[in-house]
Image: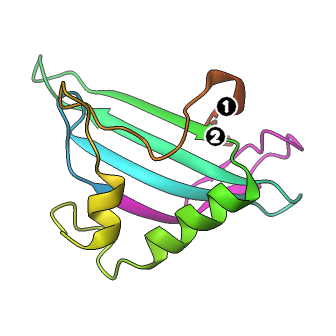
Amino acid sequence: MAYFDCPDCATAWSLRIVTSITLPPDSRSDDILLQIVRCGSCSFRGAAIYEESRRGNPDSEAWDHRGYRLGDQELADLQRLIASCSTKKDKSCRCSAHRALSQKNEYGRWQPPFATDWNSSFPMRRSR
């Protein structure tokens, strides 16, 4: 299990992914994981998005992992939706949660189910 640094209390090894759902690829990313994160040292809870692309040079790989602060209701709704899927690791699942969380724009780019405002985001830093 991976642990990260908490963006609120800055405690190393305290932020962990408590649940996630794997979503279908989009026009940019091969892997998309939507995650719920929680700190074991303080009351912080939020969401994270992990995206990885293996397109282009066969030896290249690009990834981005960012966390987001969400309101209590928005986080609770997201948690309920993710929990409703029995096959969270199956990116081809067609359940209502996967369909709701897999929305794409007109360019085929995945659209997160919440505002990805840089002011409410933080890098997912892995504790060393």
Q: Quadrant of the C terminus?
A: top right
Q: Residue at x 64, y 56 (%)?
A: 74
State the residue at coordinates (42%, 79%): 84
Q: What segment carries the magenta color?
A: 1-21
Q: Nearer the viewer, residue 66 or 12?
A: 66
Q: Which residue is mark 2?
A: 68
Point out residue 99 in the picture as x, y percentages from the top left corner.
26, 61
Answer whether residue 24 is magenta in the image: no
Lateral position of residue 32 relative to residue 66, left or right: left
Q: Name the amino acid, label 1.
A: Phe
Task: Report the front residue among 57 and 28.
Answer: 28
Q: CA distance from mark 1 to mark 2?
A: 6 Å
Q: Residues within 10 Å of mark 2 (few under 14, many from 20)?
A: many
Indicate the secondary structure of the residue bearing disc 1: strand
Residue 16 visible (yes or no): no
Q: What residue is rendered at 12% in x and 17% in y? A: 57
Task: Give the mark count.
Answer: 2
Mark 1 — residue?
A: 122
